Amino acid sequence: MYEFILIVIILIGFIFLVSIPILIGYLIYRLIKRKFKVKYANIFAIIYSLLFFLFILYQIYEDELFTKNEATELVEDLGFKLNDDFEIIENKSNEGMESMTHTFILKISNNDRNRLINEIKTSKNYMPDSIFSTDKIVYPDHYKGKKIVWNYEDESWYIRHYYQPNNEGYAPTDRSISISKTSNELRFEDVNE
């Protein structure tokens, strides 16, 4: 029963979100048609419709349109630089009721992999697998505090975890980069709560 109600609410929200831009476009079309020529109103309608449908298509295919430049920027935000070419293996975004996650996996070169692992292992706050536990990661206040960077390893990954509280009303920045111990795989995860 609850699933049905949730689906109905989501459907009503979707219809509402789609109908508002259509209604605004129609009102502007009518205004242009009344004040100017029908020709200008038709030109506006065509351009507005194209932009609206391009926006919808972008929202639907956002994960497929993810580029190497975007991946490079997100990796560099966490203090890593990829010197060699890489391949995007997977990219996905998931939206839940309370959070949104963006995850991508890159196949990086051996040189980049070894260098990034070395950067994690030589950082001043590095915790090897033997002393690391999730109990050691203490998150600051959700809205106030300084940026915190943890560098650690678990049984399968070398990890750099970045957490920065943002002001009241904004989700904190919670990102991590994991580098596989057994392959040339780099995994990026961004969680917005």
Image (cartoon, grey):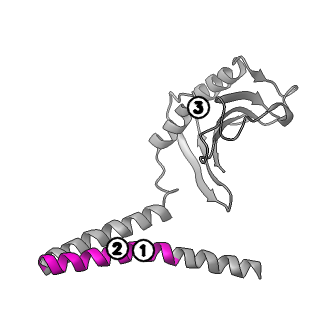
- Disc 3 is placed on an element classified as loop
Judged by depth in the image, the label closer to the viewer, 1 or 3, is 1
- Magenta range: 15-37
- Disc 2 is placed on an element classified as helix
- Disc 1 is placed on an element classified as helix
Q: Amino acid at mark 1?
A: Ile
Q: Amino acid at mark 3?
A: Leu
Distance from the alpha carbon under mark 2 to that under mark 3: 41 Å
Kindly identify which numbered label has been placed on residue 20: 1
Horizontal and vertical percent position of residue 73: 49, 37
Kindly identify which numbered label has been placed on residue 78: 3
Q: Earlier in the sequence, mark 1 or mark 3?
A: 1
The N terminus, quarter of image: bottom right
Q: Is residue 29 left or right of residue 144?
A: left
Q: Is residue 94 magenta?
A: no
Q: Earlier in the sequence, mark 2 or mark 3?
A: 2
Asked if labels 3 and 2 touch by Cβ distance under 8 angstroms, the answer is no
How many residues crowd around disc 3 within 10 Å: few (fewer than 14), some, or many (20 or more)?
some
Give the vertical position of 66 relative to 86 (above or below): below
Judged by depth in the image, the label closer to the viewer, 2 or 3, is 2
Q: Nearer the viewer, residue 67 or 166?
A: 166
**Main secondary structure found in the magenta portion:** helix
Say which residue appears at 69% left-offset and 19% top-offset: 123
Say which residue appears at 32% left-offset and 74% top-offset: 25
User: In this figure, which residue is indicated by the disc labeled 2?
Assistant: 24
Horizontal and vertical percent position of residue 155: 82, 35
Please state the total of marks drawn on the protein image: 3
How many residues crowd around disc 1 within 10 Å: few (fewer than 14), some, or many (20 or more)?
few
Say which residue appears at 43% left-offset and 77% top-offset: 19
